[in-house]
Image: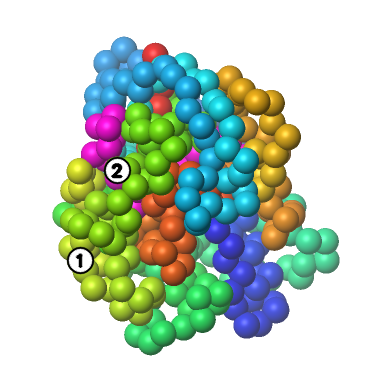
Amino acid sequence: MKFLYCKSEFFISFISAVLLLGIFSCHSPSNQNNETGNKATENAVEVEHVKANRYTAFENMVLIPAGSFMMGGDGSEAADDELPKHKVNLKAFWMDEHEVTNAQFAKFISATGYITTAERKPQWSQLKQQLPPGTPEPPDSLLNPASLVFTPPNHAVNLQDYGQWWSWVPGASWKHPDGKNSNIQGKENYPVIHISWEDAAAYCKWAGKRLPTESEWEYAARGGLQNNIYPWGNEHIDAGKPKANTWQGAFPNNNTLKDGFFGLAPVKRFKPNGYKLYDMAGNVWEWCADWYSAVAYKNLPAVVNNPKGPVSSYDPEEPYAKKKVTRGGSFMCNDSYCSGYRSARRMKSSFDSGMSNLGFRCVRDK
Ligand SMILES: [Ca+2]
């Protein structure tokens, strides 16, 4: 996702910097002994990792069978970075049947004391590594824990101006999804949000799992169908009964609520795909393990076995940013803005940023 959206050049640079903040090398200001605290967290993660392997690894997971598929865009909406289609062979793997929920993520935090990216003070020394040379340093007073929150306007806007519906909100995090005065009470079964790639990877490791590769994610989303556009087949997103939590109406100022949800939905509220996976389209975008490259599919061999993606990130729109793949679309997607609910639709986000429409699920080897 590209979120360069503010009118002031300085603020553009600042927001870009904050979106790109580092995680493992920066710490919470409340952590009095950063090195000791970090080791304690790592140890706790390792201990819980072992426990998870023994007792809980297969809860709420489904087995995705080994097989082959044609990876890449189907239909007229296929983007250049989804092409060409190419054959991928995959081993069998287990996948979470639904997106990781607030209740699940809370167990991870309780067990490890992990502090998410959004809860940490951004460090300029980390931010500037992913910005064009010469980007000015923002005042320290602006470098506070925060995250991007969806704040829809009440009028039609230029869909190229992302700043019209995203706000940088101090105090926003997985526990306070709309800012410091909000909370997740009653939202235990909602997908966890404001999660960076590194937060997601840390959770999966603790659970004895890992993030899916991009090819595993797409193969799983297709649910056994071949060359279909959506996880449910080829019926258009707006035809028939609601099939996923997306945006119906004129994004971002008018939502007809046809699917029953303005924002996030609890997990498992829509029919699963052919592999019994829920919400592979809509609700929240999901992190994948792979680095994003706009040219990842170009010049591949005719058949690829268990691909892990490119060795580095490449987004020509923001060449200094290090971006990971996200998949599946969110409650904010419709055809006028982004048809993220298509099985082949690729998106990308800086690995060290979260936002209010981005979550994840885990996989593990068979
Ligand atoms: Ca919706």
Nearer to me, 90 or 62 = 90
Disc 2 marks a residue whose amino acid type is: Trp
**Residue name at image x 25 percent, y 67 percent:** 262
Residue 106's x, y, as percent? 30, 41
Disc 1 marks a residue whose amino acid type is: Lys
Q: Is residue 20 left or right of residue 101?
A: right
The nearer-to-camera label among 1 and 2 is 2
Q: Which residue is mark 1?
A: 258
Quarter that holds the N terminus:
bottom right
Residue 37's x, y, as percent? 51, 36
Q: Is residue 83 visible?
A: yes
Q: Which mark is residue 232?
A: 2
Cα–Cα gap, marks 1 and 2: 18 Å
Which quarter of the picture shows residue 250?
A: bottom left
Nearer to me, 146 or 340 = 340
Magenta stretch prevailing secondary structure: loop
Which quarter of the picture shows residue 95?
A: top left
**Residue name at image x 41 percent, y 46 percent:** 229
Nearer to me, 366 or 166 = 366
Per the rendered image, the range of residues in magenta is: 272-292
User: Could you tell which of marks 1 and 2 lies nearer the N-terminus?
Assistant: 2
Residue 136's x, y, as percent? 76, 70
Q: Which mark is residue 203?
A: none
Looking at the rendered structure, the number of numbered marks drawn on it comes to 2
In the displayed structure, 173 sits above or below 203; it is below
Disc 2 crowd rating (10 Å Cα; few below 14, some 14-19, many 20+) is many
Decide if ligand 1 comes within 8 Å of the CB at mark 1: yes
In the displayed structure, 80 sits above or below 134; it is above
Q: Is residue 143 left or right of residue 114?
A: right
